[in-house]
Amino acid sequence: MMIDHPILGPRDAEEFVYLGDACLMVRPDGMAADAAEAFATYLYARENPAGRHRELWFHEQGDQSWLIVTRCTRTHAIEKVELAQDAARAGVVGQ
Amino acid sequence: MPELRLTETPAIVRAPVERGGTRLVAVGESGVLTLVLRRGDPQRLAQEIGAALDCDLPAVGGSTDATGGARLLRPAAERAHLVTPGSSVPSAAEGETFYGIDQSDYWSCLNLSGPLSRACLERLWKPDLGDAAFPPGAVARSALGPVAAVLCRLRPAAYLLLVPRSYAQAGFDELETSLAWV
Amino acid sequence: MTQHHRIGGGLVDRSQSLSFTFNGRTMQGHPGDTLASALLANGVRLVGRSFKYHRPRGMFSAGPEEPNALVTLGEGARTEPNTRATMAELFNGLQAASQNHRGPLGFDLMAATDLLAPFLGAGFYYKTFMWPRAFWERVYEPLIRRAAGLGALSGQDDPGLYDKGYRHCDVLVIGAGPAGMAAALAAGRAGARVILADEDFRPGGRLLAEWHEIDGQPGADWAAAAWAELDGMEHVRLMPRCTVFGVYDHGICGAVELTAPDTPEDRPRQVMWRIYARRTVLCAGATERSLVFPGNDRPGVMLAGAVQAYANRWAVAAGRNIAVLANHDGGADLAEELRAAGLSVAAVVEAHNGQGVAATRGRLGLRGVTLGDGRRLDCDCLAVSGGWSPNIHLTCHLDSRPVWCDDIQAFVPGSVLPEGMRVAGAANGAFSLPDCLAEGQAAGRAAAEAAGHPAAAPVHRASGIAHAPAPVWRTGPEKGRAWVDLQNDVTAKDIALARREGFGAVEHLKRYTTLGMATDQGKTSNLPGLALLAGATGRSIPETGTTRYRPPYTPVSIGAFAGRERGRHFRPVRHTPAHDWAARLGASFTESGLWLRAEWFARPGETGWRDSVDREARQTRAAVGICDVSTLGKIDIRGRDALSFVDFVFCNGFASLPVGKVRYGLMLREDGLVMDDGTTARLGEHHFLMTTTTANAGPVYRHLEFVRQCLQPHWDVHLVPETDGWAQFSVAGPKSRALLSRLVDAPFDISNAGFPFMACAELTVCGGTRARLFRISFSGELAYEIAVPARYGNALGAALMEAGADLGVLAYGVEALDVMRVEKGHPSGNELNGQTGPVHLGMDRMASRRKDYVGRARLGISHVDGAEDVQLVGVRPVREGDTLWNGAHFLEPGAAATLEADQGWMSSVTHSPALGHAVGLAFIRNGAARIGERLRAVDLVRGSDVEVEIVPPHFLDPEGERLHA
């Protein structure tokens, strides 16, 4: 697979390490009273769609940036690639 | 107690390798100042780098000349490496938008030049080495097979490579093998 | 010596002669020959025995689809079994041997199985070999193993060299026949970056086998001229002998390139290329299929296009008296061509006009046929054509399905193709030469334009027509033995049988009969098989469907997948900055991930590793020892929010850590279990240096960047890995301060007051060398770690040894390091194995309640089943001389060794030189409350059952007095 890094251009997916669903970026408040349940959902519950999936990739062999890749899990077509930090700063991470 | 002085061991102890007019050399003496760049204010960043190092900050994926034969490589938005001939680097510079760490011991330098250079790299390097994607002056960080590396195309058939010290021998081996096999 | 079957013309170089052997017999050929063409030129047509029935077999085709002519090339370690003779480029000294027979090729003892044919139909092994049961392992299986397979491996290491590479282009053209050449010319002339790959050693595809004219030139000449023009273009890369075997996502193709046969042995023989193409033009041509009729497997029964290729390209007469059988008018055209080449044609049998072949004769090679009307015909070669199937395989590697085209009675590419791919020429079902050229050129132009290189449209002039096959798939009576899959010996009867037994779906047919499962993957047999199945089930061929096509298109050596990553190149070896120093001192090295680390330093007179390791641990505790700990991960952390960052990633508090102090940090995963541990030093208000365990340097850095970029994107904090940049030594023991005081430069105050336990500082040593000093202890002794830039690593080791000679300094390795930390009760990788959290480790009080941090929410909640309530304790054998084993499980006295009774497991053991007996660290259920209790440590694998006592996990100096000395 090729991942079109927003700054570095297209790179082989083998340069990256895959983490999982981008929902991992929306971390619940660890001090809240219901934190244990909220984190169980955060850690273990996944939509796991057959289709459009927003997911996190780490460019280990490149610039060590985290990317949010919007990819179809059926066809592997990649719709969008964003810098995770920019998306996190802008507060736009949702599906 | 007699005065103890610590002597240096080079990162790669290998003689240069040559074939087909192409030469692979471990650079004995070089300094690397790694710069951490903050992304907030690009203009201020360029200005501070210029003032501190007396050279232009290159765009991501490029490099610029600095004084004294040094070169400033920029493989990423937040990272640059000033590579200097001779092992001393400017004392760790710092500004609002950046700071530097002397990584002369972290990175070892290799030079690969000659008509077979690109064919050698092709056996190991996944990103595009073509003239459009990677012209002279271009910089990219990827890997030579299993060995992480920062690659700079100095001239059409001359390359500079930075390889982490513990992988330096392995990186030299891989390029030497490529040179023997292409 | 003489090549009786060589005729005039052809594209071989008669000025040179090449010598080769087949089954020990020496023969001659020419450059440009394949082994197959050279054998036929010498009149050899029996080349092997079939898989199941051991029937005599000869060349069937002239290309990669060859099912029969599988030979073993080479000898000794360079043996290559199952090589298609049709694809083996002839070179001087080639050695080949036939496969799959006992006794000589002409008298195979295993041919007796052919007599058992009625019992060996499809799926026979599902119905036999069942009784008596005991016979399966001892009789049947060994027999089947000996009978199975075709060629045999040498059993020796492959001395061949293989490599890999990566190429990028605008346009990848797959196939250098007329369509591919036209595509490459169009794209190349437009200035696009082109790669043109063809599996053959000579480009031109069917232009080399057939008589055509293009732009007024013979087809083969036109191809050569086009190739030369492309070769002269700087932005065009030609790759002959290169098979594109697979299509992957996003325009990535896998290809394997064979180097020329005369490549010296110290160069790679194959290179596996990953090709990144913006656009791909597939011009893979088409494969001819046979017809199904009784006795259609004898040597001499060949594809018509192959007979043509042998005559035109290789100047070889496949037979002296050739009959032609076809279901289209191409048969008549071929007959004309063969006659013009000086060959004798016995008959043209037109299956599209009701004629057919009903039987053949000739045991070791065709001698004649019986036609459908009963006439007997003498012939030594039968050229068969059942039409052509476009080579659509690569279009289907990414979940596309082909569609049926009635006009040509074949499958053509479906409507959804891999990203950026377009098909042209025969692969697209366009079989006439003008169509091939036009489609290729249009596809090449479009691809170049899409890549930013618009082009003019040169047109190639040629004429030619294609013959549409009639939907006739078999001739002759049903009761004769008619082959469908030649390589796996699957007959028409097998297909009927499968259908009768309920395996009438195409995917079931394949697995039940093994049709299409041999090394040729059914290239010539899939479609006839489908047609027969369709007929038997009363469906159309498109309704029956096809099985899936998967990479590789043709077989690829395992060696090519490995590339150079074997032996020395399998993994890089990482040396520490003090490696040379350790080697000079006689270190024995062990692998720790990719690193080499000194495990111990044997001295003369020591008989085993225990002697060395015990000595090193004892002496370090008595005086001073030094150990290279450079491999631990080091991460430089700076920024205005560096403190908040460090406080967020560790479960214990760091907010109060002063500048100049270092603290143990326990890093959790978000599920509350331990990820890693290490020490973090505060070198400045906004400057920290974190260490990680050796193995986790990479994963921890990845995790920290995730926290920085994704969880806390507004923080000003930056991370720079520093592991390789520093050489670091642990200096441990009561005399460690004395030793270091001889290295540190004035005015640094290394006294206990000036540099207390858990202090850190930047300083200089040995007259001005930059250094960092940390007062931390893994051994439990008074200890420090000293770091200098990596280039001084060897020198620092030597300086410490020299400066400490009169103090009794010695070097210790990772074994002694481990002995001492177990004695002290420090957890290490064995304890931090991903199953344990702070509670299990007895560190729950370290985990803060007052801040949010990674792992806080699930602390004490997530657990591994069966290990919820284990706690880290120490164990000692009740009988002092007993050995403890790591991995042993604990049982109460008298309990049976069952999972329900399991009380926990041993995680680390060592012989303690300080105490004189074995000690262990263990996770025992409710361990903290069971100090003093006696259990059994049971290791069923090693047959050990030792009584142990549970003790606190700190065997030495539990109050830590030595640390603060």
Image (cartoon, coloured by chain):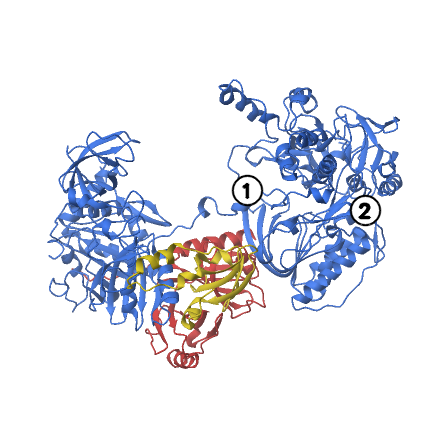
Chain colours: A yellow, B red, C blue
Task: Please state the horizontal and vertical placement of residue C757, each as a whole percent of the image.
Answer: 15, 60
Residue C70 position by quadrant? top right
Q: Nearer the viewer, residue C897 or C920?
A: C897
Q: Nearer the viewer, residue C190 or C601?
A: C190
Identify the residue at horizontal 83%, vertical 51% (top origin).
C212
Whether marks 1 and 2 lie on the same chain: yes
Task: Indicate the chain on which mark 2 is placed.
Answer: C
Question: In which quadrant of the rendered image does the C terminus of chain C lie?
Answer: bottom left
Task: Indicate the chain on which mark 1 is placed.
Answer: C
**Looking at the image, is C102 positioned above or below residue C397?**
above
Query: Which residue carries the number 1 mark?
Result: C558
Residue C26 position by quadrant? top right
Q: Is residue C598 left or right of residue A76?
A: left
Helix or strand or loop: what does disc 2 sit on? loop
Q: Nearer the viewer, residue C965 or C864?
A: C864
Q: Is residue C905 visible?
A: yes
Separation of residues labelled 1 and 2 (CA atoms):
35 Å
Question: In which quadrant of the rendered image does the N terminus of chain C lie?
Answer: top right
CB under 8 Å between callouts 1 and 2? Answer: no
Q: Is residue C107 left or right of residue C751?
A: right
Which mark is first along the chain, 2 or 1?
A: 2
Disc 2 crowd, CA 10 A, few/some/many (<14, 14-19, 20+): some
**Looking at the image, is B105 positioned above or below residue C574?**
below
Looking at numbered disc 1 in the image, what kind of residue is underneath it? Ile
Disc 1 crowd, CA 10 A, few/some/many (<14, 14-19, 20+): few
Query: Which residue carries the number 2 mark?
Result: C210
Task: Please state the horizontal and vertical placement of residue C399, each as a whole percent of the image.
Answer: 61, 51
Q: Nearer the viewer, residue C317 or A20?
A: A20
Q: Is residue C917 left or right of residue C68?
A: left
Helix or strand or loop: what does disc 1 sit on? helix
Looking at numbered disc 2 in the image, what kind of residue is underneath it? Glu
